[in-house]
Image (cartoon, rainbow, N blue to C red):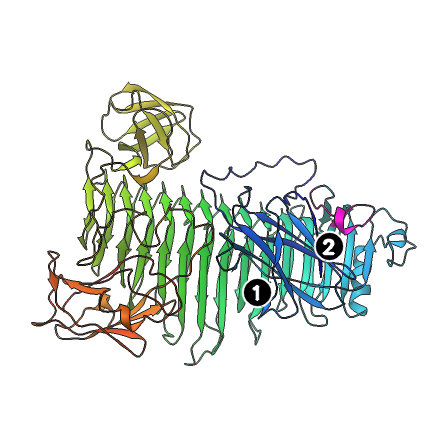
Amino acid sequence: MLLALASCGRFALEHPGVVVVPPPEPLPNAHPTIGLVSAVAATDRLRADWQVHSGGEPSTELALFVGLNRLHLFETTPIPLLSTQRHAQVLGLQADDYYIGLAQRTDAGSPWVQSGPVLSVRTGPILYVDPAAPGTGDGTTPATAYNDIVLAVLTAFVNGGGNIYVKQGEFTNVSIPLFTRVHLYGGFSSTFRLSERDAVGHPTRLVGIAGAPVVDTQNGSGGSSILDGFEIDGQSVASEGVNETNEPLELRSVTIHDCGRGVKLRAQFSPLTVPVVLANVVSRTNALEGVSVDGPYDLEVDGCLFDSNANEGLDLNHLVALEFGASSLHVRGSRFDRNGTEGLDCHLGVPAGAGHGGGFFDVRIQDSDFEANALDGVRVDIDYDFFPEWDATIEVRGCRARANRAAGVHLDLDSRCSALVHRVASSANSGDGLELTSETFPGHCVVSASTFHANAGYGARASLGHYGLSLAHCVFAGNLAGGVRSEVVGSFSHSCVFDRQSNARFGAAFLGDVETPLGSLSPFVRAADEYVRVDAASGAVLTIGTPSTEVLGASLELLDDQVARTGLLVAPTTVELAPAPDAFVVPAALALFHPSGTVEEDWRLASGSLAGQAGLAAPGGPAVDCGPFGGAEGGLPGVEGLVPTRVFTLATTVPAWSDGVGANTTLALHFRGGTPTSGSVAGAVFAFDLHGVERAITPALVSGAIEVPAPAGGWADGDVVVVFPSLASDEGAALVSAIAIPIQVP
């Protein structure tokens, strides 16, 4: 295979002539995720396009992998890429089905790590479509192009599939059947050269008709349907932009707007899990959901935008795991802004007629933003309450949830699962920063290296049910209702900072936390000195809950929007802001920064900070800092690292600690992300009483789990077992942080 490189800009299809309010620019410290956004095949070559989803430049080494076997794709020879390039061609290919993947690494000594989705193409003959061509062509050459896109699709279908190149232009009043193995590519110039393809510079528009989908997938000759490089305009009359039923589908660099639903995926009666990829898809201003899903899917969402849809941005109701099967939702590098209900709402369910065979869900939401949605920013809801044989892994990592009108992150864990919230920044939401709800099934959620500030509710709250919170290296600052609240079962925090935080804890024990009250030195390089409650707002004039003269000379911030404002004290509880904010929901927190200047938080510890070396450390081990940078896999909240690490974390305990542990009961710890190595157990697992005094225990690795017998005299209320990051995984992954298991003796 040969490689040809050329420069290419981002895909950002827009409706010509229509003014669309752009989504807010990415916040500072934008997500570093990078992935493929397009792949096009010709007779003997293919072209792949990629981008950094936040619009920045790559800061890692990149390589392309091309092969015939998806399972072993990243075992093939890597094709190195230049960091300045945005697309590449691979030449000298035989006619066949190919898979393309992108990988990155930090340096030449590091392994390649997959980055983003794997896309598929099939090299072979091409049909050509030009909306301005005469109606006499046979589609076999650019000079004899079809002018009818539906005719081209039907011809490819009759031929058993194929590639269709579509020249820039507009196709009106269409409802296109898209068969599997038919691959439809827009964005071509009049030359139809692969090297000149540019979906931005050569936009290709599909305009729908009333009551029908603009693109409707159909069963063909196996494989996937592919739509790549189009704008779909529903004109507020089309039922869906893309309608899919039971068939594999890849949507790449597609913008969909003004439809009933942007994308409708349905596989309720499918006997198999259906793979669907959405890469660089924009779905906005639709009358219902941006994307609606129901059935057993492996759904990959990479570098997408869901903006201003009347209902959810992305709604899975339900994502179904078949009996003895598995389904997945992987969201990465995406944005969910200003949708009419939740930004992302994922319900996990079982198929009709389910027995007791069980199934599995893999839900990973990474490096994504959820802003200004009318309900929760992101919600994951377990609906297999009466089917405990089903299980799930749920991760929310490196995400931001800001200014949503309910919770920033809401996990409704009504049955068995392993849940992790890591390096999340949840701020200025009208509800809680993190809301954990459940029913009768016991369990826990690990929360590490995250910040929860300026929320109108609690920073983190476990309400109802029998799931508790195990919190490590987090920050709670200026949340109006309080820091942490655990209403039914006890929770635990360690190595956290409660900064300017009233009602720091309710129902949560702790060790190694630091509290810095109003008036004390900030423990951080840059953070608000005070948070003032806003009870009413009229334009630029705010009514605050308590008199404050500190607004004078301070930089003021609302909704964590990174806008530095000044304030005029009109009356003891009345402040006029400049510039005036957009309309917002009260109550809200007004953040005051001294001295004036930037209002961007820097959660690194300041020199001489009270939180330095104040965290919970292993006996005989090195001192540990509190806050999000102090944990083993800590870092800036709201983003992941350049190359995200594999997760190693506590999945479950037997018995579940949230249900209580008998005084003489042996506690079994089960992990995800590998099996603990036996030699690391004794130096990593310790027990302490409620005052932090060590209790002697003899943990041991038994059948892949760590068993912790009760200490002499038995467990006592307030004891805690802590697994420290020196615990090693046989897969090489590092523990996300020290994880605490509080002991509650019935």
Q: CA distance from mark 2 to mark 1?
A: 26 Å
x%, y% of residue 732?
Answer: 39, 65
x%, y% of residue 704?
Answer: 32, 76
Magenta region includes residue 178: no
Front residue of 19/628: it is: 628
x%, y% of residue 562?
Answer: 41, 33
Horizontally, is 376 left or right of 272 in the view? left
**Tag 1, which secondary structure?**
helix
| Residue bearing mark 1 | 74
x%, y% of residue 543?
Answer: 30, 28
Magenta residues (range)? 187-200
Query: Is any atom of residue 710 visible in this view?
Result: yes
Q: Residue at x 53, y 39 (%)?
A: 23
Q: Residues within 10 Å of mark 1 (few under 14, many from 20)?
A: many
Task: Give the position of the C terminus as an image quadrant.
Answer: bottom left
Sequence-first tag of 2 and 1 = 1
Q: Specify the amino acid type for callout 1.
A: Phe
Q: Residue at x 17, y 53 (%)?
A: 511
Task: Give the position of the N terminus as an image quadrant.
Answer: bottom right
Q: Specify the amino acid type for callout 2.
A: Tyr
In this view, the mark in front (2 or 1): 1
Front residue of 744/55: it is: 55
Front residue of 214/53: it is: 53
Front residue of 125/65: it is: 65
Magenta region includes residue 195: yes
Query: Is any atom of residue 487 visible in this view?
Result: no
All told, the count of numbered labels is 2
Disc 2, disc 1: CB below 8 Å?
A: no
Main secondary structure of the magenta stretch: loop
**Numbered label attached to residue 185:** 2
Q: Residues within 10 Å of mark 2 (few under 14, many from 20)?
A: many
**Numbered label attached to residue 492:** none
